[in-house]
Image (tube, rainbow, N blue to C red):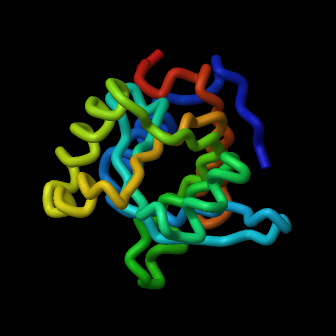
Amino acid sequence: MTSLQPEKVGMEIRQKVRALLSGQGLGVLATADPDGHPYASLIAIAANADHTELYFVTPRATRKFANLMHDNRVALLVNNSINQPADFHAAVAATILGQARLMEEESREKALSIYLEKHTYLKQFATSPSCALFAIEITGITMVQKFQSVSELSPDHGLDTDS
């Protein structure tokens, strides 16, 4: 595994991560229950403009919500695979590490707007009083491409800069 310093993170890698976060609508969220057991959930995601946060909605009466209220550390797998042999050479996957926070009041409206812009068909679900909107503040990204080529990025690598 190669850990890349900010000045060595190439424009191509940053562009692939941006494209993945902007282009994919689904990801697999990993949380931990109070006993430390992992739990994975398929979620609909949307990224903010500078790719520092990802948003998702979940019903409050779920194991995922309870886990997040106990421990807000998360991992999120986002990938562009299509379940074909070519994926071993063409697919890109990113494991995003971060901390989830329940969105409240004025910050919730902007995040909800970003989420619904991408997932218009989820408006009734996302605006239901029984659902909660979360933001994942990205603290690290591990990107895998060509099956074994691994790159690590941190938020200070500037995903939205091309230098």
Residue 82: quadrant of the picture: bottom left
96 horizontally vs 45: left or right = right
Residue closer to the observer: 70 or 53: 70
Q: Please provide percent x and percent y for residue 131.
A: 37, 58
47 horizontally vs 62: left or right = left
Residue found 73% across the figure and 62% down from its top = 32
Residue found 21% across the figure and 50% down from its top = 118
Residue closer to the observer: 9 or 23: 23
Residue closer to the observer: 121 or 155: 121
Q: Is residue 105 above or below residue 57?
A: above
Q: Please provide percent x and percent y for residue 92.
A: 49, 59
Residue found 72% across the figure and 24% down from its top = 5
Q: Is residue 20 above or below residue 81?
A: above
| Residue 145 shows in this picture | no
| Residue 14 shows in this picture | yes
Residue found 66% across the figure and 60% down from its top = 67
How many discs mark residues in the rendered view? 0
Q: Please provide percent x and percent y for residue 85.
A: 47, 84
Q: Please provide percent x and percent y for residue 31.
A: 66, 61
Q: Is residue 104 above or below residue 57?
A: above
Residue ranking furthest to the right: 35
